[in-house]
Amino acid sequence: MALTQIKSTIAAPQAVGWVKLSVTTASDSTTVEVTSGFSTTYDAYMIAVHHAVPETNGTELNAQLYIDGAFRTDSFYNYHVNRSSDGSTSYAGSADNAAAHMRIMDGWGSATGEGCDGFFYVFNANEDAGHQKVLYQMIFDGDGGDQNVTSAKGVGSYHDDGYTGGFDTMVCAGVRFVAGADKIASGDFVLYGLTK
């Protein structure tokens, strides 16, 4: 009876779901730019914001996208953000269809124990379709008064309608967070990519 050699190969396990790609830490930062980890490997991205605190009480947090080789600062952003707090059953909101950024929240607290946490999603980042869409949800401690805990939920997009220079590509390769005219004192911005 002849012996037969049997060889077995086991494939290395592949990462599934959300894959951690990079961490960007704020430290008295005028802007926090999350670019490391964006590639053609993933189409959907999530940035988890961990205890981000502004230098000045009551400031705002905005976002801009990296498209066609630069963070876009022209007025082609649309957004709508809805805010609710434990101090009221009513809702507040803000919206714009020709802004230089997407508003995430305002009234952001800087006192001890305050700050914000949440998620910022980029969809179809590698799709060259004339616009980029985002969705975000944050929970933060307000700047005093009734706003002890506030939720901010929003949607936004960047589009090239009417841009006379024309873009070579609409692929999104990063997100910049800006604290209005203030600085982001501290916080981690963790980028994840969703496995295709």
Image (tube, helix red, strand yellow):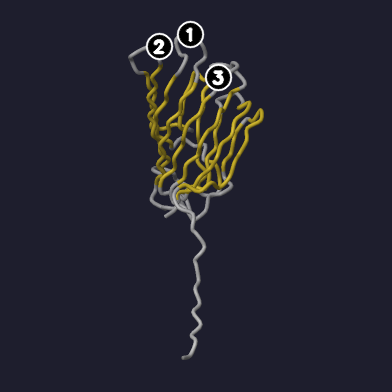
Give coordinates of residue 46: x percent, y percent: 47, 41
Q: Relative to residue 81, is residue 8 drawn left or right?
A: right
State the residue lying farthest toward the top.
145
Mark pair 2, 1: CA separation: 8 Å
How many numbered discs, if any? 3
Q: Residue furthest right?
A: 27
**Picture coordinates of residue 88 (x, y %)?**
37, 12
Counting residues from the start of the chain, the first of labels 2 and 1 encountered is 2
Residue 114 is marked as 3
Mark 3 neighbour class, 10 Å CA radius: few under 14, some 14 to 19, many 20 or more: many
Kindly give the residue lying farthest to the bottom in the view shown: 1
**Residue 145, label in figure:** 1
> Which of 148/82 is in front?
148
Instruction: Give coordinates of residue 27: x percent, y percent.
Output: 66, 30
Which amino acid does the dot numbered 2 rest on? Gly
Name the N-terminal-most of marks 2 and 3: 2
- The reply to whether the C-beta atoms of the residues labelled 2 and 1 are less than 8 Å apart is yes
Instruction: Give the residue type that dot 3 points to.
Output: Glu
- When the figure is inspected, residue 139 is found, relative to residue 41, above or below; the finding is above
Q: Is residue 141 left or right of residue 129?
A: right
Crowd rating for badge 1 (residues with CA inside 10 Å; few <14, some 14–19, many 20+)? few
Q: Which of 162 and 193 is in front in this view?
A: 193
CA separation, marks 1 and 3? Answer: 13 Å
Q: Residue at x 48, y 90 (%)?
A: 2
- Residue behind mark 2: 87
